[in-house]
Amino acid sequence: MNTYDSYQEELEYRQQQDSIPNFNVELSVREVHALMHYMDSTFEYKGIEDFVEGMSEGDDECWDIEATKSVYNKLLDRSRYCYEEGLLSRV
């Protein structure tokens, strides 16, 4: 199997996953920040856009760039909300 076939299989698998209804996952603020810390560390603190810039199909096959960006941005939105609403402030 060549790289193209493998990538096509991955895209088909993603379509299958997209057909499943979304889950509602409850996360605490600590869990949101733990996941963000993990992702930021993985992204070498470049930010999601800089991290994925120039990635190839092979990279996308591994990272699922669209889903990775989506989950990171959702976590970031929740974190910002907590700060903007004053739920998290250092005294």
Image: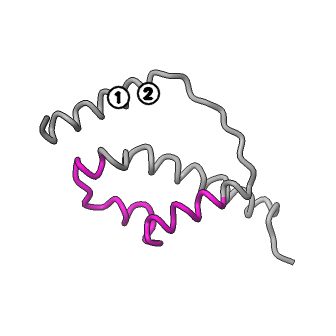
- Which quadrant of the view contains residue 30? bottom right
Q: Label 1 crowding class (10 Å Cα cut-off): few <14, some 14-19, many 20+?
A: few
Q: Which mark is residue 13?
A: 1
Contact, CB < 8 Å: mark 1 with mark 2?
Answer: yes
Q: Foreground: 7 or 18?
A: 7
Q: Which mark is residue 87?
A: none
Q: Is residue 75 magenta?
A: no
**In which quadrant will I find the C terminus?**
bottom right
Q: Which residues lie in the magenta part?
A: 33-60
Residue at screen point 73% across, 62% down: 84
Magenta region, main secondary structure: helix
Where does residue 13 sit, x and y in percent of width and height? 35, 28
Of the residues shown, which amino acid type is indicated by label 2?
A: Gln
Left/right of residue 58 with respect to residue 27 in the rendered view: left
Q: Is residue 40 magenta?
A: yes
Q: Residue at x 57, y 28 (%)?
A: 22
Q: Is residue 68 above or below residue 41?
A: above
Which residue appears farthest toward the right when viewing the image? 91
Q: Position of residue 31 (x, y in %)?
A: 69, 54
Side of 74 where 27 appears, left or right: right
Q: Which mark, residue 17?
A: 2
